Amino acid sequence: MTDQSAPQGALVCVPRLLQRNVEKHGGKPAYREKEFGIWQSWTWAETAEQINDLALGLMLLGADTGDHVAIVGRNRPAMYWAMMAAQSVGAVPVPLYQDAAAEEIAYALDHCGARFAIVGDQEQVDKVLDVKDGLPGLEHIVYLDTRGMRKYDHAAMTSYADLQTKGRAAAGQFQAVMDARIAAQTYDDTCVMLYTSGTTGRPKGVVLSNRNVIETSKNSSDFDGLRAGDEILAYLPMAWVGDFIFSIGQALWTGFCVNCPESPDTMMTDLREIGPTYYFAPPRVFETQLTNVMIRMEDAGRFKKWLFHKGMAVAKRVGPDLLDGRPVSGMDRLKYKLGDLFVYGPLKNTLGFSRVRVGYTAGEAIGPEIFDFYRSLGINLKQLYGQTEATVFITQQPDGEVRSDTVGVASPGVELKIADNGEVFYRSPGVFVEYFKNADSTADTKDAEGWVATGDAGFVEEDSGHLRIIDRAKDVGKMADGRLFAPKYVENKLKFFPNILEAVVFGADRTMCSAFINIDLTAVGNWAERNNIAYASYQELSQHPQVLQAIGEHVAEVNRSVAADEMLSGCQIHRFLVLHKELDADDGEMTRTRKVRRRIIEEKYADLINALYDGSAEVSTVTEVTYEDGRKGSISATLVLQDAAVASGQAMAAE
């Protein structure tokens, strides 16, 4: 096991790291935010003042050691400061998803017993107020954005700025007490509590200690040589463990700058303006960006198309070798340099990736074709494998050992083992303390020796030490004839196509595989516009004969690829349908981190699955949906069921 001692200089908690950064990097930018089109910046010294004032304000409200403080809002420096202010008074920050429904927020607030909620704006205030009557432990709401809040009852509500002002005025009363609380914190005190995405039931509160966060931040930063001059863009949900580690853990450890975009709509523009050197995105973001690139190329002139495809052919062949320092001929180097001048450079600049030195993707497996596309451009994109329970990092890909078919080697301080049934286990300094108020689930997940069950099936390559993940252990199964069934493998191949946003494959214990497919409305809508095809809704476009034909061609191509893999050739799709609606977190079909809730989909759409297997040519269905304002409704549709072209492994091998 790893060294359990505290880090040098007794940096045993986030507030002490903050104090260290004020001394070491005081005048350097710590957090930036774009507001009204203008970037505003705060140095480490200014950040510490903002946090201190808010922490004093929380003490004025009565915040005590061990209290839980809920944080709900979009990525803004003030919301990160709220988490660190809670830590400064000895309380535990509990970030929640800003797009969560009021009922989901109510569950978390009740479960953790939050006394205080710090929220971003009127929308979040309204959500909390809607459920406050059922939360007797919730005492006070602090809101950041004052717009629309003037006529609310402020008896148990205060603006963020006002609380800071009151806290500043109360420094004489509380500063010494707060300093004493910081000094008393230990490496094993709770740092943060994060709720899991809840793919199989109610979300669980994952308790992470100062040791978990600081050791993991230190080890992962050292692994990739992260430094104070780096820049990141903080745009992923604050309730997600990765954002907490990148925007607080690693930021505090290394002293790099965290940049918050103005809004989701301006994210791509803000990304280009910042030009991050350290970047993370889940596969969905990279898939969307690639889809947009391909759409733009479809609209480009003949010469631009020719230049793009010519350049990308060279990039695909030699780009990864150049990135990894492997030998490349002088002629290929010249061709790549010309491609970089005319194609890759401008494209990376458009995507905002010109300065990326270290890039990661995780959360879901990324399609190898998508992964290789970005690597071929010279972007040092790598894969990591992690969990909330691991404080993110289980494996990472070292520079020079990056492959699309593995998730890398064990991260520093992490041990791996594979159970007899193929399930991956790990233990590390990042292993979570417990599930809050859930001793049974804690014991089921983490054994007495600290080994944690990931729930994923995989194996470690003997020669390289790289971990390969096959699928979720509970999703990997057998076909009726005994062949291996691994749905995620096929789903990722399908999602490579710009027309396909999401896919869900079925087939465990069955004679064949079938699939639900979601079209990408942006990509398919653009195609419809270019071809003068009118449509009134997503539902209508999804069932258009030409759309169904195009999706059928994509499925056939994936089947040819799957047939080439002897171990997984049984996972070819025999029948499929294009769903009449997008899978949606509000409808319970996906988690807030965009992971498919497979069991819920199987129950909700049982009629459609049965139709795929009974040979029906079409099926009529009624589906309950949730509108943006929370109202429930239903949509009716008649869906076309299609047979797919299935390939043989022998035929593929011959090709």
Image (tube, helix red, strand yellow):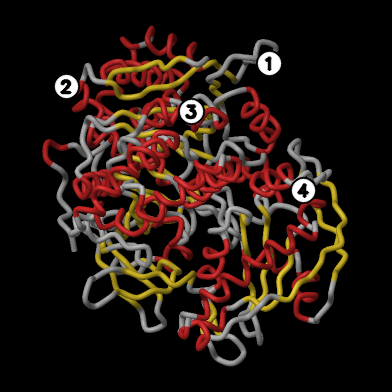
Between marks 1 and 3 in the image, the one whose residue lies nearer the viewer = 3
| Residue 172 rendering spot, x and y as whole percentages | 31, 9
Say which quarter of the image contains residue 157.
top right
Q: Nearer the viewer, residue 570 or 375?
A: 375
Residue beneath disc 1: 152
Local SS, label 1: loop
Residue beneath disc 3: 269
Q: Nearer the viewer, residue 93 or 20?
A: 20
Closer to the N terminus: mark 2 or mark 1? 2
Closer to the N terminus: mark 4 or mark 3? 3
Q: Residue furthest front?
A: 303
Closer to the N terminus: mark 4 or mark 1? 1
Between marks 4 and 2 in the image, the one whose residue lies nearer the viewer = 4
Which numbered dot is residue 23?
2
Residue beneath disc 4: 538
Q: Residue furthest top?
A: 169
Label 2: how many residues lie within 10 Å, few (<14), some (14-19) or many (20+)?
few
Left or right of 209 in this view: 545: right
Q: Residue at x 32, y 63 (%)?
A: 403
